[in-house]
Amino acid sequence: MAKLRVHNIAASLDGYAAGPDQGIDDPLGVGGTRLHEWVFASDYGRRFGGGDAGPAPAGEPSLDDRVLARGDENIGATIMGRNMFGPIRGPWGDEDWRGWWGPEPPYHHEVFVLTHHGHDPISMAGGTTFHFVTEGPEAALEQAFAAAGGADVRIGGGPATIQQYMRAGLVDEINVAIVPLLLGAGERLFANLDGAVDLYECAEMACSDSVTHVLLTRKDG
Amino acid sequence: MAKLRVHNIAASLDGYAAGPDQGIDDPLGVGGTRLHEWVFASDYGRRFGGGDAGPAPAGEPSLDDRVLARGDENIGATIMGRNMFGPIRGPWGDEDWRGWWGPEPPYHHEVFVLTHHGHDPISMAGGTTFHFVTEGPEAALEQAFAAAGGADVRIGGGPATIQQYMRAGLVDEINVAIVPLLLGAGERLFANLDGAVDLYECAEMACSDSVTHVLLTRKDG
C-alpha cells in the first residue's frame, strides 16, 4: 500500500526545523540554512543545487547521500504547506511567484500546496506542476495519492504541515536529521502532536560525521 | 582550570529532559524514566542502581558505559536544583526528606542544592553531604568549586538549573544523550537560553544502539 513519508527534514538539538522570520531572503527562516549545511556538503546536495557536482564519487556513497537518495525513491507526488512554497501570506496578489526552486523545480511530479487561497495550477519545466488545494489536508492527500499512481507521497514540509498529518495519524514514516547545534528560536518540528506522539517509534538511528539520522515509523505500520 | 560540566542528561527527540508533573512517584516526571532506559540497561546503570551487576563484562565497555563513566571522572562536587533533590515545593516543613537516592547516595562528595528555603546540611553515608544554598547560582558555584578542591564541578540538573548556568555562560561542557522517542510534554532541556545558544558548539557526536551522545563545548573553551 502506498505510504505517506517525510524525508530529510532537519532539526536542531533544541528542536527547530526552521529559523524564525521566514521571508524572501530567508526561505528557511533566519539561521535555518545552518540546518542544511550537511545537505549542501553532500554529493546529493551539490547535484540538487544545480551546481557542478563533478564526477560521481568513487566507492560507496556516504550515509548522508544514501539517506538523501532514499527520500526520492518511489515518490510519486509531494504535498507542502504554503510557507514552503513561498513567502507570500494572505491573498496571492499580482505577483507571479512560482516557488523557490527556479524554472525547473527538483520535484518532476505533481506538487500539492495547502492554502486557504485558490490559485490556478502552475506548470514548470521538468514535469513539476504546483496545484493549490483549498479543501484541506485530507483532500490534498487524496489528490496526491491519485496523482502518484500507486507510488508513495512525500510531505515536503514545513513543520506545521508535517505536524498536521502526524496528528491525524496519517504519516507512515518520518526521516529526520538531528543537527548538533542550537538555533534558539524558530519553528519546532515535533510540537503540537498531542496524543500522536505515542503512534511513532524509532526504527533506525545512525550518525554520519555531521548529523544523526532517525527514522520514525508508525507502530501499526 | 576546573570546569563546570553537565553529563548524561537525556533529551527526547522533541526536546524534553523530563516528563511533566514530577512528584514522589515520578521523580523524572510522567514518562521521564523512558529517557533513562539506556542507562538502566548499561553495566554502569546496573551498578549505579545498586542492583547485582554480575561480573564485570568481558572486553571493551560499550559506548554508553564509556560516556556514563566519563561523567564521574574528575568531579569533586555537584550542584543541583531543588526539584532534582526532591518533590517538596515551598518551605521544607517537617518531613525528613533526604533525597531520592536512599541512605548512601551515589555522589560521595559535597552536593549543593539551589533553593529559596534554608535547610541545615544533611550528611549521608558514603561521603555525600547535601548543602542548601539560598544565595543564588553564583554563590553555589563558588562553594562547589571550593569544595571540589581543584577538580571539576558537575551540574546534576534539572533542566532549569542547567539553563540558568548555560545562560550565564558558565558551563564548559554539556554531554547530552538524545533518545529517539517523542515524549510530547515535560521540561525542555535547551530552552530559555537567549543569546547563549551561540556560545556552544558540537565537539563530538556518536550513536550507540540506543541513543546519540552529543558533547557541546563552549566556543572559547
Image (cartoon, coloured by chain):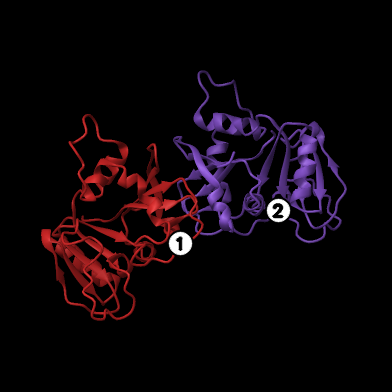
Chain colours: A purple, B red
In the picture, measured across the screen, residue B30 lies left or right of residue A187, that is left
Q: Is residue B219 visible?
A: no
Q: Are marks 1 and 2 in contact (CB under 8 Å)?
A: no
Closer to the camera, B120 or B149? Answer: B120
Callout 1 amino acid: Gly
Q: Chain of mark 2?
A: A
Q: Nearer the viewer, mark 1 or mark 2?
A: 1
Closer to the camera, A113 or B55? Answer: B55
Closer to the camera, B121 or B136? Answer: B121
In the picture, measured across the screen, residue A143 lies left or right of residue B65, that is right
Quadrant in the rendering for residue A102: top right
Measured as percent of width and height from the top left, residue A59 is found at 50, 18
Q: Chain of mark 1?
A: B
Disc 1 and disc 2: Cα gap in Å?
Answer: 29 Å
Q: Which residue is mark 1?
A: B186
Asked if A161 appears above or below B62 in the picture, the reply is below
Q: Count every numbered label the image shows and give the total.
A: 2
Same subunit, tags 1 and 2: no
Q: Which residue is mark 2?
A: A83
Measured as percent of width and height from the top left, residue A75 is found at 69, 33
Measured as percent of width and height from the top left, residue A34 is found at 53, 47
Element type where label 1 sits in the image? loop
In the picture, measured across the screen, residue B32 lies left or right of residue A199, that is left
Callout 2 amino acid: Asn
